[in-house]
């Protein structure tokens, strides 16, 4: 655990966790200060997995950064070992987060990919949960077994669905969640789309839905289109 005034920095990596041989490592990291890798990766998990928390609702200045990656997790020696990342602060790198582990990422802060990719997931059954206030600067790359989930209970906005946020096999809107899919957004054919909350298209938005939408809670508020929007 690093406190609010703590700085952990390395010329290459800020923190490197490396499990050797047939034993893989269970990491537990809570950062409320700064972790920085000047010429490499902020937090590098090599054959390791576990739980990473960056910041809190009252400590959003927490930061993990690296020249190449903010967080990089290579495949654990035990396939499918889970990695859980919860971000309230900022994670930044050439790629913000790159993970080959089975990853659950919850983002209520900012994830930045200076090279154009904010998040790259290469595991199976990965999950990205976006809370209100969460944003990505760069592409978010999933896979056909991965789920992208819009959470929260207050109105929120996300840009780039179907363009910057792409290749996820499942899109879920949680109960009581209200999301404006801003700009030009596409929910592609073949996506398993379950809407338990509300999707909005506001003035200036262009929303294309090519997938079948399941609305278990009923269709009344599942989709709201306001003047100036097209669908």
Image (cartoon, rainbow, N blue to C red):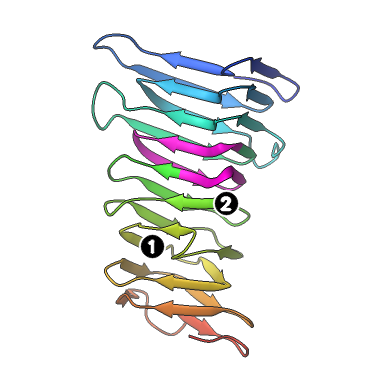
| Residue 91 in view | yes
Tag 2's secondary structure? strand
Return the x and y of residue 65 as percentages of the image width and height: 62, 30
Q: Which residue is pictured at 35% across the width and 57% down the height?
A: 168
Horizontally, is 39 left or right of 192 in the view? right
Seen at 26% across and 68% down, the residue is 190
Crowd tier of the residue under label 2, counting other residues whose Cα lies within 10 Å: few below 14, some 14–19, many 20 or above: many
**Does dot 1 land on a helix, a strand or a loop?**
strand
Relative depth, front residue between 167 and 80: 167
User: Residue lying farthest top?
Assistant: 21
Among the two numbered marks 1 and 2 on one chain, the one whose residue lies closer to the N terminus: 2
Verify whether residue 100 appears in magenta: yes
Note whether 120 is above or below 213 in the view shown. above
Question: Image point 55% across, 25% down: which residue?
Answer: 41
Q: Quadrant of residue 45?
A: top left
Magenta stretch: residue 64 in it? Answer: no
The image quadrant where one finds the N terminus is: top right
> Chief secondary structure of the magenta span?
strand
Seen in the picture, residue 95 relative to 46 is either above or below; the reply is: below
Quadrant of the rendered image containing residue 81 = top left
Q: What's the residue at 55%, 62% (across, down)?
A: 153
Question: Magenta stretch?
Answer: 92-119
Q: Which residue is mark 1?
A: 172
Task: Judge the density around disc 1: few (<14), some (14-19), many (≥20) Cα neighbours within 10 Å.
Answer: some
Q: Which residue is mark 2?
A: 136
**Residue found at the far bottom of this picture:** 227
The x, y position of residue 193, in whole percent, is 33, 68
Distance between the alpha carbons at the discs numbered 1 and 2? 18 Å
Closer to the camera, 66 or 195?
66
Above or below: residue 173 compared with residue 90: below
């Amino acid at each position: 655990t690093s406190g609010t005034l703590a700085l952990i920095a390395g010329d290459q990596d800020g923190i490197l966790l490396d499990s050797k041989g047939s034993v893989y490592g269970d990491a537990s990291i809570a950062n409320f200060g700064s972790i920085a890798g000047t010429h490499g990766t902020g937090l590098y998990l090599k054959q390791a997995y576990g739980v990473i928390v960056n910041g809190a609702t009252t400590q959003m200045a927490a930061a993990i950064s690296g020249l190449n990656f903010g967080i990089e997790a290579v495949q654990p020696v035990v396939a499918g070992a889970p990695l859980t990342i919860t971000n309230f602060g900022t994670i930044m790198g050439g790629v913000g987060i790159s993970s080959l582990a089975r990853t659950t990422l919850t983002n209520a802060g900012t994830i930045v990919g200076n090279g154009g990719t904010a998040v790259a997931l290469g595991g199976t059954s990965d999950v990205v949960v976006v809370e209100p206030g969460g944003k990505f600067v760069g592409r978010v790359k999933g896979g056909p077994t991965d789920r992208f989930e819009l959470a929260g209970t207050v109105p929120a906005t996300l840009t780039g669905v179907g363009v910057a946020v792409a290749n996820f096999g499942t899109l879920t809107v949680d109960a009581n969640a209200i999301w404006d899919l801003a700009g030009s957004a596409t929910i592609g054919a073949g996506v398993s789309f379950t809407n338990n909350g509300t999707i909005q298209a506001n003035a200036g938005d262009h929303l294309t839905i090519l997938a079948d939408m399941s609305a278990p809670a009923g269709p009344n508020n599942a989709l709201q289109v306001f003047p100036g929007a097209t669908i």
